[in-house]
Amino acid sequence: MKLTVRSPSNIALIKYWGKLGDQLPCNPSVSFTLTHAFTEMSFELCDKNSSEDIELVFFFEGLENQKFQDKIIKFILKEKEYFKNVLSKKIILNSKNTFPHSSGIASSASSMSAMVYGLLALDFKLSHKSDEVSSQTFLNLASRLSRLASGSASRSVFPGVVLWGDYKDIGTNDCAVDVSHMVDSRFLTFRDTIVIVSKNEKSVSSRAGHGLMENHPYREVRFQEARKRMDELLMAMKNYDLEAFIKIVEKDALDLHGLMMTSEPSFMLIEAKTIDCIKKLRTFRERTNIPVCFTLDAGPNLHVLYPIEYREEVVAFLTQLDLPLIHDEVGKGSEIYE
Ligand code: DP6
């Protein structure tokens, strides 16, 4: 049995930074699902050669990757009750990303959601539930299991604007939810151009990063503020209030990096060029009145967000920065490709 899944990355507008218990977020987060930055993972099931609990080989871009393989095996064995049927087979995974390493695009979100989506779809097929694949129940389970593999991956399963974390009667910590219907539809065609400030990304492991929130002096303020900001952001997105949208999104990105800088130990992922680009972007916005803003992931590269109708002006401006650009846009979530 064979299957190929494509699962996109996503960019958070309100960030998940700090977790509790079994991959539960300390505050709700919301993101745009991307289109062109995705992981394509092929799955092949064949007869097992041994009586081991799991027989799995993982290839990344054609090469066997032990580190990732061990991570996946550990995850599947922990959640084995959901993968009983696939575990009776030998599993061969082949994965590749459409985006370069250290590009400021979260690969754990796309790869972990692709892995979960594919294995779950195969498990459903083996238990004669093919028609339930991509049902709401299936998607919720895929999001929940993706969350257990990597928090932000829970959001990649769904299209458009996606919220994850306890929030009013809208979101839960358990799995993410598509909130696209709650925002003006113009956000669903938003563009995201990534400015590659540096390829030598000194990334901090997400576990270490989230861990630093445990004793952070601003911990409670951050989580309270993120919740309040979610109210404001969803309101701004419902009313297509771009001025408010820009203010909130930029504030949250700077908060994320501020929290890193004021943690113990302190670390700094933005670079002088990141700040230079932010200043130039703000000057461009003031001069042209084009509603464009930036956000940042856990790295120095800028995600520049703007409505589709301004793409020519924004891309012309970004080209002058003389840095590599990757163009993406809001898109659909995980899907079976073939
Ligand atoms: C800054 O989802 O990578 O991108 O759950 O430990 O895998 P783990 O963390 P991860 O953290 C993402 C952090 C972030 C913000 C976000 O995407 O919300």
Image (cartoon, grey):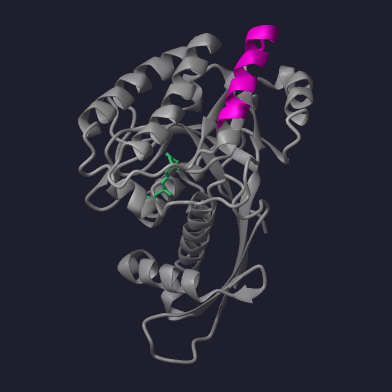
Vertical arrangement, residue 282 with respect to residue 97, above or below: above
Q: Is residue 290 left or right of residue 7?
A: right
Quadrant for the N terminus in the image:
bottom right
Vertical arrangement, residue 84 with respect to residue 235, above or below: below
Residue at image coords 35%, 48%: 209
Q: Is residue 256 left or right of residue 242?
A: left
Residue at image coords 35%, 18%: 231
Q: Position of residue 281 (x, y in %)?
A: 63, 21
Image region (quadrant) for ligand 1: top left
Q: Position of residue 140 (x, y in %)?
A: 40, 45
**Farthest residue in the bottom direction?**
50
Residue at image coords 47%, 72%: 67
Write down the region rendered in magenta.
Answer: 275-291
Whether residue 291 is visible to the viewer of this picture, yes or no, is no
Nearest the viewer among 157 and 128 is 157
Residue at image coords 42%, 13%: 235
In reply to whether residue 288 is colored magenta, the answer given is yes
Figure quadrant of residue 185:
top right
Quadrant for the C terminus in the image:
bottom right
Count numbered badges in the picture.
0
Q: Is residue 332 left or right of residue 227?
A: right
**Farthest residue in the front direction?**
272
Would you say the magenta stretch is mainly helix, strand or loop? helix
